Image (tube, rainbow, N blue to C red):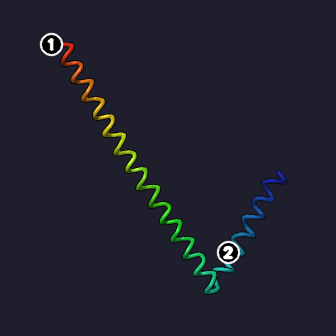
Amino acid sequence: MKGALLLIVGVAIGFVVAHEVAKTDAGRQFFDDVDGKAKEFGDAVVSGYKAREAELRTAVSNAQDAIDDLAKRAKA
């Protein structure tokens, strides 16, 4: 219980400090930089996910083609 209380207090203090820092020009620039880097990271994750998804879809399609080919040969 004490740990949860300390966590909540720490988060609240962090928000207050971040809000005060963001009021300065340097603080605003810092948070803009952090925001830009976070967006770049998120875009990279999405791009990687989509590329891997395409690879897996191709692999599944190729496997299905191979299964269909084997099934045709078995019937012949």
Furthest-bottom residue in this view: 25
- Residue at figure coordinates x 33%, y 40% from the top left: 57
Residue tagged 2:
18
Based on the displayed image, in which of its 4 quarters is residue 32 positioned? bottom right
Q: Residues within 10 Å of mark 1 (few under 14, many from 20)?
A: few
Would residue 56 appear left or right of 31 to someone viewing this image?
left
Quarter of the image containing the C terminus? Answer: top left
Q: Secondary structure at mark 2?
A: helix
Mark 2 residue type: Ala
- Residue 9 in percent (x, y) is at 78, 64
Q: Are marks 2 and 1 in contact (CB under 8 Å)?
A: no
Label 2 CA crowd tier, 10 Å (few <14, some 14–19, many 20+): some
Residue at the image position 59 percent from the left and 75 percent from the top: 31
Marked residue nearer the N-terminal end (2 or 1): 2
Distance from Cα at disc 2 to Cα at disc 1: 72 Å
Give the residue at the far left of this rendering: 76
Answer with left or right where residue 16 lies relative to residue 61: right
Residue 44 horizontal/vertical position (percent): 45, 59
What residue do we see at 28% from left, 33% from top?
Answer: 62
Find residue 13 and report its horizontal and vertical position in percent.
75, 70
Q: Which residue is mark 1?
A: 76
Is 69 located above or below residue 48 in the figure? above
Can you tell which mark lies on residue 45? none
The number of numbered discs placed on residues in the rendered structure image is 2
